[in-house]
Amino acid sequence: MSYVVTESCIKCKYTDCVDVCPVDCFREGPNFLVIDPDECIDCTLCVAECPVEAIFAEDDVPTDQQHFTALNAELSKAWKPIIEKKDAPSDADDWAKVTDKLDKLER
């Protein structure tokens, strides 16, 4: 089982989770992070660090967010690893509570 980044991360892209990951399993896209399921060791450290509660264990992903499991797997193959925390986008707080923003995901 791995962990999955879900919709709340889109356009927020806080990278607090990256700092605590012992195996560098996060991948960075233009406005979203994903977890490489082949690299994740299920340590749970990232979950508590996410300020928008976007990270779930694969078995606990909310029903309406299940498609993010496959999306993490797909995009983790195309995107580059991120291994250090970066500043969040200047408008990240504005997007933090917005829902239904899959159409905002930039690949």
Image (cartoon, rainbow, N blue to C red):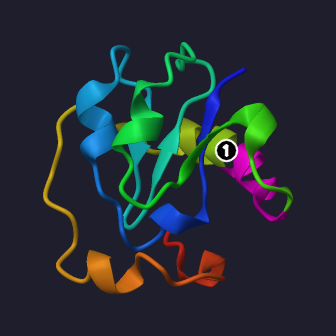
Q: Quadrant of the N terminus?
A: top right
Residue 9 position (above or below residue 71): below
- Count of numbered marks: 1
The x, y position of residue 102, in whole percent, is 63, 76
Q: Is residue 60 left or right of residue 20?
A: right
Work out whether residue 32 or residue 91 is closer to the camera in this orientation and state it.
Answer: 91
Vertical side of 49 occupied by 88: above or below: below
* Magenta-highlighted residues: 64-71
In the picture provided, is 23 more to the left or to the right than 84? Answer: right
In the rendered structure, which amino acid carries the disc numbered 1? Glu
Q: Residue at x 66, y 83 (%)?
A: 100
The quadrant where residue 31 appears: bottom left
The quarter holding residue 45 reads top left
Q: Please state the horizontal and vertical placement of residue 9, each as a whole percent of the image.
A: 47, 62
Q: Residue 68 at what x, y percent from top left?
A: 71, 53
Can residue 92 be seen in the rendering of this structure? yes
List the residue tagged with mark 1.
74
On whether residue 24 falls in the magenta region, the answer is: no
